[in-house]
Image (tube, helix red, strand yellow):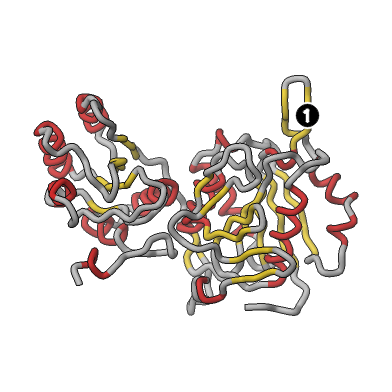
Amino acid sequence: MHTTKKKKILIIYTGGTIGMRKTADGYQPAEGLLKWHMAKMPEFKHSAMPSYDFIEYANLLDSADMSPKDWNTIANDIAQHGDNYDAFIVLHGTDTMAYTASALSFMFHNLRKPIIFTGSQVPLVEAHTDARENLINAMLIAGIYAIPEVCIFFNNQLLRANRTQKTNASGFDAFSSPNFPSLGEVGTNIFIRQDLLLPLPEAAKTSWQVFTQQKIATFAFFPGVELSLLETILNQAPKALILETYGVGNAPVKQPELLKLLEMSEEKGILIVNKSQCLKSNVDMQSYATGQALATRGVISGYDMTIESIITKLYYLFSQLSLNLSERKKLFQTSLRGEMTVYSAQMGI
């Protein structure tokens, strides 16, 4: 929905390349530099831009150091200021932006305001930066449109956060949404796919779920993989294990050790998710006997979710102590924030 009233947004700067400067040791965070540089740029004073306040974290983080504790901090800051702003921009390093943005998409219940993550591949102070366009356009979208979900804006694309992955380490098109269309695009005009946006929740009150640290593991199959390594992981009693499988969810089930390990895991109450290694994929464990062998041993589908979405959704479910394993499995296989596509055949229809 398009709004004409001038909005006020809060920019939360957590760290990342966007506010760094070049030093003899490479790019380093620079306290106060980003806010100072923005104040000097006339683009941010344009009449079309929303007004904004700026919060800079005392300890600017390289996003490789992000943790669930930091996700909680960001979510809490947004919640604390929720009544005072119309939208929120989170400036974040690109390496784990998709994890943090996905986490916040699950954390917030009944979200009614845009939370848009952005950053850059090149610092704002550099001549060839992508930061200017990313930040200005993210602010414009937040200031014009009522989008009740968490998004990532990068390289002229507005993407649903929990559908997004970093797929290019050095190009300006750092992020993509392999299994879901973009929510919007900026060119000569700003175009938003209103038909794809999550609906505005009926409940007026927005709340958020604190994430607690969880033992979640991943294991990737490849030809010749030693299953003793999988056994070692399972012996650590993780709450959940993500199996990174082939194609539509296939694994080397002719190895009897694998099936025994899965049966043991089911008995121990470990939640096991089947995630395809293919970038564009939708796990279907009914198509092949190998997939069916996993399903009959309690493995559940990761559908077309990103690995970032699967991990943060598991954090969300295991942080709710009132849920039992059966309830967590059911909720995991339900689209909670538009993070997955379930086709009728997969639902047994």
- Please report the residue visible at 52 percent of the width from the left and 56 percent of the height from the top: 161
One can see residue 258 in this view: yes
- Give coordinates of residue 210: x percent, y percent: 46, 52
Q: Residue at x 63, y 64 (%)?
A: 185
Secondary structure, mark 1, is strand
Where residue 112 sits, quadrant-wise, is bottom right
- Number of residue marks: 1
For residue 348, side relative to residue 147 (left or right) = left
Residue 211 is left or right of residue 320, and the answer is: right
Quarter of the C terminus within the rendering: bottom left
- Residue 98 is situated, as x and y percent measured from the top left of the image, at 52, 48
Q: Tell me if 110 is positioned left or right of 241 in this view.
A: right
Crowding near pointer 1: few (<14 within 10 Å), some, many (20+)? Answer: few
Query: Which residue is pictured at 28% across the width and 56% down the height?
Result: 328
Please tell me which residue lies in front, 222 or 151.
Answer: 222
Point 53% across, 67% down: residue: 111
Would you say residue 84 is visible in this rendering?
A: no
Q: Is residue 249 above or below residue 146?
A: above
Residue 143 image offset from top left, x and y in percent: 72, 68
Disc 1: which residue: 22
**Hey, which residue is sitting farthest top in the picture?**
24
Residue 333, horizontal then vertical, whole percent = 29, 60
Pick the front one: 7 or 162 = 162
In which quadrant of the rendered image does the N terminus lie? Answer: bottom right
On the rendered structure, is 336 left or right of 31? left
The amino acid type found where label 1 is placed reads Lys
